[in-house]
């Protein structure tokens, strides 16, 4: 047990510079381009799903939360909202960068998420009918409170706060995974997880729905440890919209509509993961 604890601690500490630099860059990008991105989505019109899907792949603090507020105010369509949810990466990108995942693999994952988000968003707007945008920013301050929280102490402190939070999650998750692997055996676990078609995507999708950064950290780490397949990982990170769903249920008065968004997000993420699994 002491050896597992020590190895996990050493591996986690090694990630600190990569995580911090990644979050510092993300905070800088959000500080410089965050409001422009929100304005682009706001005024995208029929191109909303395309603009939302493209902007969603860039790491931005609270982008999915801001999109939920815009949707609740009837400023963007359901297709645009779901395109953003599907393409946004939550904590997947920083964790993969810190674990030195090849750049081409990262690009492939991000482009896949963007493509799925754009196509799904266009189809949803076409089938359900695009909701008309209306003027007004009712409750906008409440909806963008997450963005303000991220930026109020400056990008350096915000990046440090994010780094420490994710380090705690990474340490605990890695410790549990290393303990389970030592107890059961990596080969047995991998055999069990990798030989359950469809079930892996269904379970990963449920984990991805949890509105907490730990969900995307868990899914990413399981994939990097070789314990879940690429398709299952994609299902989890497609469904994982960060704080977006939490904000949506808080600010949107139509709870049936919120449930529709949640069900569509889950169904699309799982279906895409299953298709990817059978094609790879």
Image (cartoon, rainbow, N blue to C red):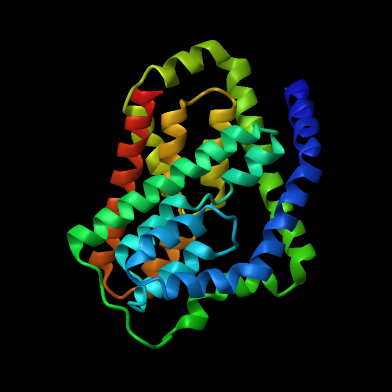
Is residue 210 in view from this perspective?
A: no
Q: Nearer the viewer, residue 162 or 155?
A: 155
Q: Position of residue 65 (x, y in %)?
A: 48, 66
Q: Is residue 218 above or below residue 52?
A: above
Q: Position of residue 225 (x, y in %)?
A: 59, 25
Is residue 195 in view from this perspective?
A: yes
Q: Residue at x 60, y 33 (%)?
A: 104
Does residue 69 appear left or right of residue 271 in this picture? right
Q: Is residue 162 above or below residue 280?
A: below
Q: Residue at x 57, y 15 (%)?
A: 186
* The image quarter in which residue 69 lies: bottom left
Can you say which quadrant of the picture contains the C terminus? top left
* The image quarter in which residue 149 lies: bottom right
Q: Position of residue 276 (x, y in %)?
A: 37, 30
Q: Is residue 14 above or below residue 150?
A: above
Q: Residue at x 54, y 68 (%)?
A: 37
């Amino acid at each position: 047990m002491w050896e597992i604890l020590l190895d996990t601690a050493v591996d986690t500490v090694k990630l600190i510079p990569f995580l911090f630099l990644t979050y510092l860059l993300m905070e800088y990008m959000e500080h410089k381009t965050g409001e422009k991105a929100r304005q682009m989505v706001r005024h995208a019109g029929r191109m909303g799903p395309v603009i939302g899907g493209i902007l969603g792949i860039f790491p931005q603090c609270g982008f999915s939360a801001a999109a939920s507020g815009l949707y609740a105010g009837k400023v963007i369509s359901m297709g645009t909202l779901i395109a953003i949810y599907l393409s946004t990466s939550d904590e997947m990108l920083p964790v993969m960068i810190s674990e030195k995942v090849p750049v081409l693999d990262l690009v492939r994952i991000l482009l896949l998420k963007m493509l799925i988000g754009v196509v799904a968003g266009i189809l949803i707007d076409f089938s359900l009918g695009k909701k008309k945008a209306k003027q007004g920013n009712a409750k906008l301050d409440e909806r963008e409170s997450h963005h303000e929280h991220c930026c109020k102490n400056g990008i350096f402190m915000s990046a440090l706060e994010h780094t420490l939070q994710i380090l705690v999650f990474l340490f605990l998750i890695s410790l549990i995974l290393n303990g389970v692997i030592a107890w059961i055996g990596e080969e047995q676990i991998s055999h069990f997880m990798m030989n359950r078609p469809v079930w892996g995507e269904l379970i990963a999708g449920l984990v991805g729905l949890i509105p907490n950064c730990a969900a995307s950290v868990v899914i990413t780490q399981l994939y990097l440890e070789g314990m879940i397949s690429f398709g299952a990982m994609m299902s989890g990170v497609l469904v994982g919209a960060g704080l977006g769903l939490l904000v949506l249920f808080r600010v949107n008065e139509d709870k049936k509509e919120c449930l529709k968004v949640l069900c569509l997000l889950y169904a699309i993420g799982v279906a895409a993961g299953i298709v990817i699994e059978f094609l790879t």
